[in-house]
Amino acid sequence: MRSNRVGWLLLAPTIAILGIFGIVPFLYVLYVALHQWNPFGANPYMVYNGANNFRRLVFDNEFLTSIAFTLKFAFFAVLSEVILGYFLAQLFMREFPGRGLFRTIHTLPLIVAPIVVGSVWRLMMTPSIGIIPYLLKSWFGYDLNIGRDATMAFALTVIMDIWHWTPLVTLTLLAALVSLPKEPFEQAQIDGANRWQIFWHVTLPMIRPAILATVFIRLMDALRTVDEVWMLTGGGPGAATRYLGLHIWKIVFPKTDYGYGSATSVIVLYLTLVMCWLLYVALVARRGQKRAS
Amino acid sequence: MRANRPILSILLWTLLSLVTLFPIYWLFVISVKPAVELFTTPSVLLETVYWKNYVKVLGDDTLRRYMFNSIIISTGNAVLVTVLAFMACYALSRFDLPGKENIFFWTITNRMAPAAVFLLPFFLLFTQVFVIGEWKLYDTRTGMILLYCTFNLPFAIWTLRPTIDAIPKELDEAATVDGATTWQVIREVIFPLARPGLAVTLILTWVFAWNEFLLAATLTSFNARTITTGLSEYVTTTGTEWGTMASIAIITLIPALLIFSVVQRHIVAGLTFGAVKE
Amino acid sequence: MKHELGMSLAALAVGLMTSVMPAKADFWSDAGAKYKGVTLHGVTESTPPSNYIKDVLAPAFEKATGIKVEIETTSWDQMYDKAIKDMEAKTGIYDMVYIEQDIIYAYLARDFLVDITKSLKDDPSLKAPDYDETHFTTFANYFKNADGDLFGIPMEAFIKLYLYRTDLFNDPAIKEAFKKETGKDLVPAKTHEEYTQIAEFFTKWGKDHSLELWGTTAQASTGHPASWYEFFESVAPTFGVYNWGIDASKNYSASVANGGTMNSDKAKAALKYWLHLRDIAPPESPASTWTEVATTFAAGRAAQGLVYGENAAWIAADAEKSKVVGNVGVALPPLEPGVMEDAEAGKGYIGYYDGGAFGLPITSKNKEASLLFLQYIGQDSVQGDWAVAAPRITNTATYDDPKVIEMDKKLNGYYTMLKNDGKLFAGAPPYPFHAQVREATAPIFYKILLGEVSPDDGLDQMAAAAEAELTNLGYRK
């Protein structure tokens, strides 16, 4: 057996970098979260106030609303992206002329910076003079106004997210599909399994880790999205698209409420962690069960 | 793989591509319209083309410097992250390290943090901890390359791990029995089989680094400023210079596309490996 | 526009340096000699006046003194965040920071800035002959402390104006129709009632004639603080509600019960007036920030509106961005009776006077060299070209510059108005906090805009929220 020393050596740089730029800042944020600190408060210095910030959070309606909206946003966006992304990845597994071109086209949204994506969508959606509301109005007589219609504004942030990030899911799942061994599929076909059965019993179990990784990444990115939504709706109308990332940004940047902002971040981080951990355990545990049976 | 009707695929993809391309087409439309026309009754097709935004942008030295910084930082970070993640995933996959699943899960937690509050500790680290004499990590490309590891390394580890786990252990065990060193196993057995995963990791980490805004905006100022932060200079209280911003965005697509087309080939290269494994 | 102008003006300014300056050149090169090799770092928002500093004044200064100046231009949020982090952590990255009028009190409260007046008095060898702080317009008063010492060199200043379309207001057919409908002559409104009447008339006119035309603009975004600002800085004062309705002298009270005016009857009337205007404004208004309001007006979609002065100039004069060039009239905002008297007596104001200055952080490591640069951008001789490149005036010497007089004609008297009536306008209230209260109350304001809360209840809630935040910040005891 190889010695674990080599293994640790291979892991060492990762642990070192994430330790310095991950753990140290986190401890600092945790420290700040236990203080009242607003550089433009009557007392501009850090004052220890124990768990007060956290206590305040529990009753903070804005925060709770933001959580609800964010979860809704993340749910719709990530679910659509994973289903659509898987479907597209499967399509890319087929041979057809022009596949390379289409794959390139399909990855284009990824390389547009979020702030630009938000800007373009905002210009496309400006009530009455953006191209989309204009076309909807002249074709269907439908009046799309993201300044007034909270549901539509919400839907648009989801659609924008799907447009921007589905390619990421497609690429990661494509990589997973490409590296699958062929034998199980051939075996299943010999056994006379239909497409659905193959997907459910063969493909899915094998690419589950990849799906899990993709869901994780998309989920946590959706939970902290800022730039795109900020440009498209600014968090409005009202608080309809004031997602957690933006909510925290508003506490920390304009309000300079570092103490409360840190506490909010710690809680958001914790909630994200728990959510991902539950998913991880659920999916990994299921895999374990299957193996046992 | 079964034979499919290519016409159907092409048709479907053409439709999908239209949806994908429309906002990008619109970005282009914005970039070639004078500001006065952006807020009038729109039309889907372009009637006249106005190139002044491009003339202005291409003649701007500062933007060229930003672009250069972006390329260095994204590429540097993507390569570093992919290499480190490859090493880490190999270790996690093939060694029986105590607590390794916890380490694996811990890595991803680094991506969960909402960035806004972490700017302050990062700022302090960059300006007061990593300081050697006059030199600071603040506003350096190295600093950004290292910092971007916080969100890219977890991503890379999590996308690569399934790929490496899926490579049968028997292959490297066989190679070890034949007397190959760990390094040789990694290079000759794992690396070729992990190529599609590595390519995807490289591309996507590159994309994340390329698009990152908040950290770069806070931790760079003159020397290491990236093009994404440069874009935000056109969003001001006097109004947003949509045209300029859009033309820069269109130009930035070019290097990104070049890198994509080079690396993407390796994803497909993987398609043939399934057969080789027999 | 600004970049092109910047480039051509760069050449011009360099020319200026060599032709006009010889008598004073001695001072700059002598004073700069001591600091040769120093590089100054500044951070500012990328607005036209700042870009002029970066593209024209900084290079000219380097030529004159040998001191290099690097100006980082960025977005508004970033600019503040970076400056504050730097000063808070005492890093000393920046030698100059942009200070918007509304944050100066917060910076002064924290002692973030160097006293420019005192520093120049203490070391007369640094004082430039062509710089005189008494030449600044009254806007400079915002950057002074109680002793009258200056803490920032004003570099841009604008008033939020009432713009109207002269082509429409002078159209005989429209004038006749207006007279027929209202029995009045169509002239720019002096009161809110008149303004509403004109707005209603034009919105109807646009509808009846199938024109893309509405009677007023409204900066009424339901998710961006621009709407909050329009109400508290531009509309409420014209109804006699000043300083956001918060009274600093009464323990920072906002609610009427405690002595504030945020939910007073006047404020409620103002809000209803403005909400009605929003309803007859172009359909993009609920998504409009200052960006969209300016472009809406420039696209010819509104007959009148309140527009920030920094946009007034390009709307009136830049054909590449505006369709209404040559057709823009400027006037003072419509008012309730008594407000003008308040303003003239110095007890109130009729609208928003905004702008910013360049200040010197106390944490800077190159204070002397920075003082030289700040005087350089504050001196009389650079003002004229600067005002032409980026319409702003902070120094009284600018008004007499022939180039500025020429431009004033194109802008239909904007500069004259700034000169004569600038004192009637006021910047943000002198509070050591700013965005904190805005952000605490804005969510309720958005709800009012969306109709989820009535204007009356909403303002009551906002007053309560403002007081709660002020208590939390420790200002309200």
Image (tube, rainbow, N blue to C red):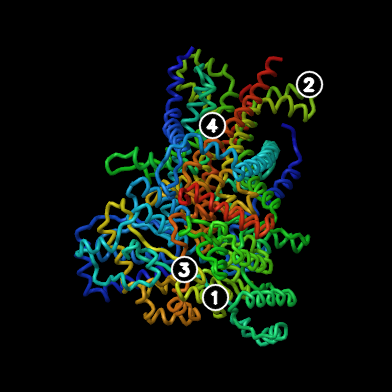
Read off the chain for label 1.
C
Judging from the image, mark 2 belongs to the subunit labelled A
Element at label 3: loop
Circle on res. A188: none
Residue A200 horizontal side relative to residue A119, left or right: right
Identify the residue shown where x is 57% and y is 76%: C337
Where does the image place residue A50, in percent across and percent down from the top left?
Answer: 47, 34
Q: Nearer the viewer, mark 4 or mark 3?
A: 3
Q: Which residue is mark 2?
A: A191
Q: Which element is circle 4 on?
A: helix
Q: Quadrant of residue C196?
A: bottom right
On whether disc 4 and disc 1 are found on a single subunit, the reply is no
Q: Nearer the viewer, mark 2 or mark 1?
A: 1
Residue C338, numbered label:
1
Q: Disc 4 and disc 3: Cα gap in Å?
A: 51 Å
Q: Which residue is mark 4?
A: B108
